[in-house]
């Protein structure tokens, strides 16, 4: 990780909170960027092999945001995914917490409680992914995709892109295939799509398969996030 010369001030009081703040990227320059989160933890460490198989069969590039707990449960798979040029491996935090400096919560999940805690949420998984995947992540997406403005500045100062989204593709892996199809088929050029790859019994893989004909017919191209 780059060493920042002037990190966001630890004593700053945040004044903004949410999923769409200045400094958070929710669009790319052309194409649609499919991103899939693996959230980790007791109920979040599954693997949607049907989704991965579909992406490979259709040669669809995707950016995979992996949580440290998920990585530790699937170190060999993480290394295999990192070695596949179809996929880009990025940082989804260490404990899957909203990134905050004062414990702000999202969806009932309490965020990191201080500047130091926010930095630990970033850096622990940064080290793990560098070790397991053999490459240093360039992007970060917080658990729940919520940030305060101090945390956004911290990520920027650490040299990491802050990943948001323009399309919520699967409602936290709770959407059925028809809802996923509707969300994805409506993705406009330049959109970053957020979905999940850790819930094999969800509707994400089936919904993407159903959306592909309309997306292909519309001339949609898919891309990785690339450089921040």
Image (cartoon, rainbow, N blue to C red):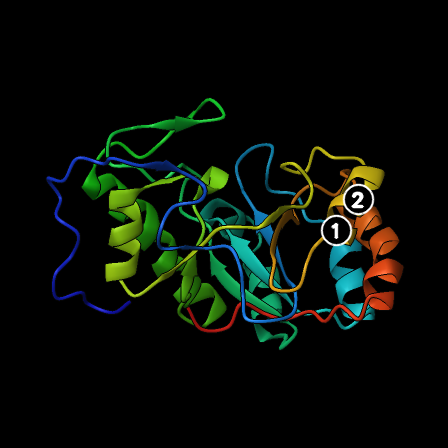
Q: Residue at x 49, y 67 (%)?
A: 133
Location of mark 2 (residue): 182
| Label 2 neighbour load within 10 Å: few <14, some 14-19, many 20+ | some
Q: Residue at x 49, y 51 (%)?
A: 164
Compared to 75, does 169 lie above or below?
Answer: above
Q: Nearer the viewer, residue 200 or 213?
A: 213
Location of mark 1 (residue): 186
Left or right: 7 as drawn, with respect to 70: left
Left or right: 68 as drawn, with respect to 218: left
User: Residue farthest to the top?
Assistant: 108
Residues marked 2 and 1 touching at CB (< 8 Å) = yes
Secondary structure at badge 2 equals: helix
Q: Quadrant of the C terminus?
A: bottom left
Compared to 50, does 55 lie above or below?
Answer: below
Q: Quadrant of residue 79?
A: bottom right
Q: Residue at x 79, y 62 (%)?
A: 53
Q: Residue at x 54, y 66 (%)?
A: 28
- The percent position of residue 55, horizontal first and vertical second, equals 76, 64
Q: Quadrant of residue 85?
A: bottom right
């Amino acid at each position: 990780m780059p060493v920042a010369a002037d990190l966001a001030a630890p004593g700053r009081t945040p004044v903004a909170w949410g999923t769409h703040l200045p400094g958070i990227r929710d669009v790319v320059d052309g194409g649609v960027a499919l991103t899939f989160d693996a959230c980790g933890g007791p109920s979040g460490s599954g693997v949607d092999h049907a989704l991965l198989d579909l992406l490979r069969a259709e040669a669809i590039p995707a950016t995979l945001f992996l949580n440290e707990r998920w990585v530790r449960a699937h170190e060999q798979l993480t290394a295999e995914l990192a070695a596949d040029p179809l996929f880009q491996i990025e940082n989804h935090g260490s404990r899957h917490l909203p990134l905050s400096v004062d414990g702000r919560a999202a969806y009932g999940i309490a965020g990191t409680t201080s500047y130091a805690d926010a930095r630990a949420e970033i850096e622990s998984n940064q080290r793990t992914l560098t070790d397991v995947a053999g490459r240093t992540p360039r992007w970060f997406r917080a658990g729940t995709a919520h940030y305060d403005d101090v945390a956004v500045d911290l990520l920027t100062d650490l040299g990491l892109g802050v990943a948001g989204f323009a399309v919520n593709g699967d409602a936290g892996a709770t959407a059925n295939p028809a809802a996923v199809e509707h969300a994805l088929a409506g993705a406009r050029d330049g959109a970053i799509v957020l979905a999940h790859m850790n819930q094999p019994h969800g509707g994400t893989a089936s919904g993407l398969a159903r959306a592909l004909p309309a997306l292909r017919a519309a001339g949609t191209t898919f891309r990785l996030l690339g450089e921040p």
